[in-house]
Image (tube, rainbow, N blue to C red):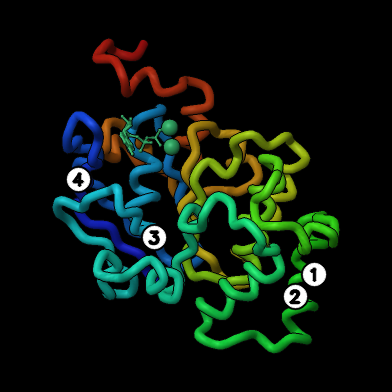
Amino acid sequence: MAVLEIRDLHVSVETDQGTKPILKGVDLTIREGETHAIMGPNGSGKSTLAYTIAGHPKYTVESGTISLDGEDVLAMSVDERARAGLFLAMQYPVEIPGVTVTNFLRTAKTAVDGEAPSVRSWIKDVRESMSNLRMDSSFAERNVNEGFSGGEKKRHEILQLELLKPTFAVLDETDSGLDVDALKIVSEGVNRAKENTGLGVLLITHYTRILRYIKPDFVHVFVAGRVAEQGGPELADRLEEEGYDRYLSDAPVA
Ligand code: ADP
Ligand code: MG
Ligand code: MG
């Protein structure tokens, strides 16, 4: 069974004012098929965790480890991480002029699998996934991210997820900027990947809304670069009612 392990991770970022420590000892273990929600106030380091897993050059791992089935993820290039089965939406450039969605997806699939998919089954798979996500077929001929609306960007992200079939996906604020209908469609896509391929999900979100559609097995509350509390789905329900105040002030909670 595949497992992604993060151990005592300390990460800093280079800013104009110098090196700023952000993650201060994060521990997380995600197994195949599990969904872990990372929740927390703005600025607590959630995206930093996502960028670090993705291998973003701006973030420096000071100490600690990330391993995938015992393999050192931190020693891997971004491409190697994708080939190892990690899906990190933010690793892809924001806009790729002159590259259509179809060509982009095929190139990504070839890079991840180490061989090009057969043309016939590929076209069928792309059509099927696009129709699942209620995407118009003309979308395939558009240039990647050029003029995409927020909702189209998220659907494109989930389209990649469906087609690349990773072992683990890190989804950072996938719910932001989506109306309820789009949120449902995107969530269904994630749930299909969970069902069909046993995808493990690290679902990073500030709000509990998406957790109505993608059910977490575990919830971790991130505060000031650390996991301040963890629990099951009931923890998300409590956050929905109480917000993050209890973690941010020293005042006792009534
Ligand atoms: P979250 O996703 O939980 O809102 P982030 O990981 O984006 O939190 O940010 C955590 C802290 O690190 C914030 O104080 C933020 O300003 C800072 N930070 C993150 N990335 C950078 C960066 N590239 N440059 C400067 N500061 C950063
Ligand atoms: Mg933020
Ligand atoms: Mg963030």
Give, as a three-letter code, the residue at label 3: Ile
> Which residue matches tag 2?
125
Pick the front one: 194 or 147: 147
Give, as a three-letter code, the residue at label 1: Glu
> Which residue matches tag 1?
128
Q: Quadrant of the N terminus?
A: bottom left
The span from disc 2 to disc 4 (Cα, nearest Å) is 41 Å
Secondary structure at numbered mark 2: helix
Image height of 148 relative to 229, above or below: below
Looking at the rendering, which quadrant does residue 80 occupy?
bottom left
> Which residue matches tag 4?
25
- Whether residue 222 can be seen here: yes
Secondary structure at numbered mark 1: helix
Tags 1 and 4 in contact by the CB under 8 Å rule? Answer: no
- Disc number lying in front (3 or 1): 1
Secondary structure at numbered mark 3: strand
**x%, y% of residue 248?**
31, 20
Pick the front one: 194 or 21: 21
- Disc number lying in front (2 or 4): 2
Looking at the rendering, which quadrant does residue 197 occupy?
bottom right
